[in-house]
Image (cartoon, rainbow, N blue to C red):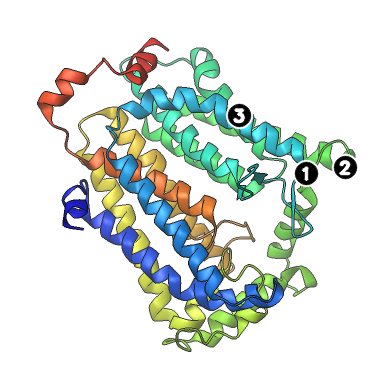
């Protein structure tokens, strides 16, 4: 055990925050699992506890393995992974998977193993690394809009176009983070305005086409519009069931909460262990628990900014911001949905909600941030720099 801790490098506070979030997650996930067991196959809740433990164990193994990789290798790796995620997204969109009788076109079922995987989550991470690579490569050049369309924006819009029909919230999150990263990377504002305007026009065209020709392609436009109209409408309708149950859970929790495992609304709230787990946390641990969790994510944001600031390279700074900020942003969106600041999105609470894909990709992102925070051995860096195939690939393209 001592050998493992001696090999842990990078920002120790980020390690500690990730560990605290993971340890705490067992309490609400195990509590909400009673509802999953009841509506599922009738098995006991311990099976869900073990499943969550396996997800987190694999996740922290990913953090440990990735943080040992010099972050400069991710430049070339993003070029390799972009075609891979595009293929995965196309396969996912075409296969039309259903899980529990519901439309689950966001997931792909892995053969033999049998578990489901959400490629859009991985695609978001790969895209942020790719954008960071491009911006760092042209940092000393005068960027023109025409020259940046093919190498920068074409992959972005292809990825977003493949995700949009099944998952608008993830598409909006990725697009927002891409705009933020390019802005911080020094991309001209006048060109960003064109990209944002083009994105809005494409979205409007897609929605109008889906409404006019509903059988043209599988999509969830009706679900989006229903959620947005329900959010804007002050009257309580059947569409507001989830958010109303979440608000009851939050109101019931009060200041101190009902106590661990004593949630009542977990029996009525769909997705109580994933999308709406924050409402269950407040019900059981009160406003104190909810605010403490919020402060923990804000602390993580602060440490991510510190790591970016301390990085010696432009790529390191942009890479940290690109993969780190979306973790906290997603957490804030999840919390905002629970308290009805945003429409229902389906975004999970990073490292807290159950679900393998969300946990593993979050851990992958944290591993990359920790890799940037590791201070490399100068002599070894000089000896190996430019010799690795991924570095050669990144410089060549």
User: In the image, residue 251 lies at what x, y percent?
Assistant: 55, 84
Q: Are marks 2 and 3 in contact (CB under 8 Å)?
A: no
The answer to which of marks 2 and 3 sits earlier in the sequence is: 3
Determine crowd level at label 1: few under 14, some 14-19, many 20+ residues with C-alpha closer than 10 A. many
The answer to which of marks 3 and 1 sits earlier in the sequence is: 3
Mark 1 residue element: loop
Q: Nearer the viewer, mark 2 or mark 3?
A: 3
**Which residue carries the number 2 mark?**
214
**Which residue carries the number 1 mark?**
219
**Which residue carries the number 3 mark?**
86
Q: Nearer the viewer, mark 3 or mark 1?
A: 3
Q: Is residue 390 above or below residue 265?
A: above
Left/right of residue 323 with respect to residue 154 in the rendered view: left
Q: Residue furthest top?
A: 396
Which quarter of the rendering shows the N terminus? bottom left
Which quarter of the rendering shows the C terminus? top left
Left/right of residue 289 with respect to residue 108 in the rendered view: left
Instruction: Please indicate, yes or no, whether residue 350 appears anywhere in the rendered image.
Output: no
């Amino acid at each position: 055990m001592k050998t493992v801790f001696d090999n842990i490098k990078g920002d120790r506070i980020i390690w500690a925050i990730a560990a605290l979030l993971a340890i705490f997650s067992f309490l609400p996930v195990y509590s909400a699992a009673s509802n999953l067991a009841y509506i599922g196959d009738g098995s006991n809740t311990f099976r869900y506890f073990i499943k969550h433990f396996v997800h987190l164990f694999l996740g922290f193994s990913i953090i440990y393995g990735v943080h040992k990789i010099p972050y400069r290798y991710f430049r070339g790796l993003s070029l390799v992974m972009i075609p891979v995620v595009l293929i995965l997204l196309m396969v996912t969109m075409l296969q039309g998977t259903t899980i529990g009788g519901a439309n689950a076109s966001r997931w792909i079922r892995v053969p033999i193993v049998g578990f489901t995987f959400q490629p859009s989550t991985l695609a978001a991470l790969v895209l942020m690394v790719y954008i960071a690579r491009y911006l760092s490569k042209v940092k000393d050049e005068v960027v023109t809009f025409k020259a940046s369309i093919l190498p920068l924006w074409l992959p972005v819009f292809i990825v977003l176009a493949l995700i949009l029909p099944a998952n608008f919230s993830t598409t909006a999150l990725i697009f927002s983070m891409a705009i933020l990263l390019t802005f911080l990377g020094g991309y001209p504002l006048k060109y960003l305005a064109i990209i944002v305007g083009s994105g809005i026009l494409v979205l409007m065209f897609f929605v109008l086409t889906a409404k006019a020709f509903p059988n043209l392609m599988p999509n969830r436009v009706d679900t989006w519009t229903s959620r947005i109209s329900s959010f804007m409408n002050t009257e309580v309708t059947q569409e507001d069931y989830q958010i109303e149950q979440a608000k009851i859970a939050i109101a019931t929790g009060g200041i101190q909460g009902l106590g661990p495992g004593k949630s009542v609304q977990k029996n009525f709230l769909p997705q109580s262990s994933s999308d709406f787990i924050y409402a269950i946390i407040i019900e059981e641990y009160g406003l104190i628990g909810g605010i403490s969790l919020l402060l923990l994510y804000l602390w993580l944001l602060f440490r991510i900014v510190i790591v970016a600031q301390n990085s010696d390279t432009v790529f390191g700074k942009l890479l940290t911001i690109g993969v780190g900020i979306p973790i906290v942003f997603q957490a804030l969106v999840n919390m905002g949905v629970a308290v009805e600041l945003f429409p229902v999105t389906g975004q999970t609470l990073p490292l807290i909600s159950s679900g393998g894909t969300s946990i593993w990709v979050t851990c992958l992102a944290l591993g990359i941030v920790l890799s940037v925070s590791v201070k490399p051995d100068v002599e070894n860096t000089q000896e190996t720099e430019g010799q690795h195939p991924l570095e050669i690939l990144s410089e060549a393209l």
